Image (spheres, grey):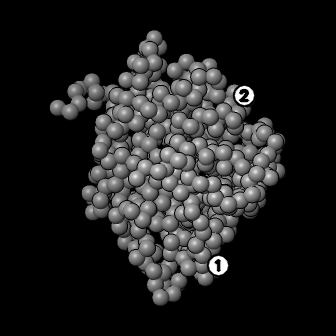
Amino acid sequence: MLFDRAEILETLRMLELENLDVRTVTVGINILDCRGESFPTTIERVLAKIRRITTPLEEVTEEIAGKYGIPIVNRRVALSPVALLLTGKEGERVVELAHQLDQLAQELSIDFIGGFSALVHKGFAPGDHLLVDSLPLVLSQTERICGSVNAASSRAGINVDAILRMGGVIRETAEKTASRDGIGCAKLVVFANAPEDNPFMAGAFHGPGEADCAVNVGVSGPGVVKEMISRHPHASLGELAEIIKRVAFKITRVGELIGREVAQKMGIPFGIVDLSLAPTPQVGDSVAEVIEAMGVERCGGWGSTLALALLTDACKKGGAMASSFVGGLSGAFIPVSEDAGMSEAVRLGALRLEKLEAMTSVSSVGLDMIAIPGDTPEEMISAIIGDEIAIGVVNHKTVGVRLIPVPGKRAGEKAYFGGLLGECTIIEVNPFGGGKFIRRGGRIPAPITSLRN
């Protein structure tokens, strides 16, 4: 037997008491074969392909969730980067595509569609220019469309022109959604080393190297990890690592089981399970609380980066033993507004932007879901993005940035986004900027460690 009776009971307890769920089943779809003689024809083909593949998704996920008693929180779709469909001459029809995708998502009970994305780590093609220019309108006029821009990679270097441009896009998007605390920015990520099979929003897209379609799964589980740590108050750090590895193994098995059944019933390939611990605004389902359960007085205090490094590594090791098909971001998320413990740490002043940046060197995502004052200059936003991107490029890891300048609000006030996006205290930003530096533009060469051929 793979599991004994005690292990089965423990998994059931994870579901009932410790907030274990499948955070997302994400169907990746290649839309690059949908190009038509005209862009309206392309739109029709894109919508038809998504409808054909994903129509069974709601019924299948509800059936499997009921069968195993495992909540499946979100159903999502990740498309090929839309910029690859564009010639640059489509104009406002790009926004029309976003509107029609948004309506289709609502019709099919899809929570988010990702892939309004551009890969510009070495420069812009005409389609990339058009897509990036359209993002403020797309993200402010739709509810379920998410976008991302990959501005750097460890192999290509850092496109500072793209980062500088994204500072303006983020500010404009915030202003267009000012009545909702700049929520449009919560659907936009700037990446370095973006993965092609990420199931999590807002950065999910279906990469050019992927199959025609695939099912990718992301699992939650910070509450489970916290509970197991709390049961071993005297364990050494090495013993804690073993405990977390065992829990991550079981969480990953749950995710792959669900993903494979969904894929089989839909008649499409299973892709990957993402090992990330995805928190929620619900108390008890927090990566910050895991760090505190290890013994750090408050997340953001000294020892937080070390604790997060232990947690991330143990999750990767346990998950990798559970599945041979691991991908996406895979580690531990530290989004501020989406994690009740992180949000509380910011409110108390224990967690600052600089400490968050340090912690991202050992986490999976980067500076994620961070509300900043609405009057933060766009060049300062770009410089913050650039600092984070550098961590990813030099360390050959994925990082992403979701900054939300909240119009009309200052540090210490609250921003409210709702649902899984949560709420948080607006964090203070160091007033000494790097605008003159970032305005130099150009492309920073890849680090010497990129020469691995």
SS of the residue at dot 2?
Answer: helix
The residue positioned 34% from the left and 38% from the top of the image is 320
Alpha carbon separation for disc pair 1 and 2: 45 Å
Q: Position of residue 67 (x, y in %)?
A: 30, 46
Q: State whether residue 354 is above or below residue 393.
A: above
Eyeballing the image, is 163 above or below 71?
Answer: below
Closest to the observer, 128 or 136: 128
Residue tagged by mark 1?
Answer: 92
Please tell me in which quadrant of the rendered image residue 9 appears.
top left
Does residue 336 appear in this view? yes
Task: Tell me where residue 41 appears, x and y as whole percent.
Answer: 48, 84
The answer to whether the residues at label 1 and label 2 have Cβ atoms under 8 Å apart is: no
Q: Residue 342 vs residue 46: left or right?
A: right
Report whether residue 166 is seen. no
Picture layout, residue 77 above or below residue 362: below
Q: Position of residue 204 (x, y in %)?
A: 49, 56
Q: Amino acid at mark 1?
A: Glu
- Where is the N terminus found, in terms of image quarters? top left
What SS does tag 1 mark?
loop
Q: Residue furthest top?
A: 234
Q: Give the numbered dot on residue 375.
A: none
* Relative horizontal placement of residue 168, taking residue 52 as reference (left or right): right
| Residue in the picture at 60% in, 78% down | 88
Which residue is labeled 2 in the image? 348
Q: Indicate the quadrant where residue 297 lies.
A: top right
* Residue plotted at (81% across, 42% down): 432
Q: Amino acid at mark 2?
A: Leu
Q: Residue at x 32, y 48 (%)?
A: 325
Relative depth, front residue between 177 and 61:
177
Q: Say whether disc 1 or disc 2 marks the residue closer to the N-terminus.
A: 1
Using the image as rendered, state which of residue 58 and residue 52 is in the foreground: 52
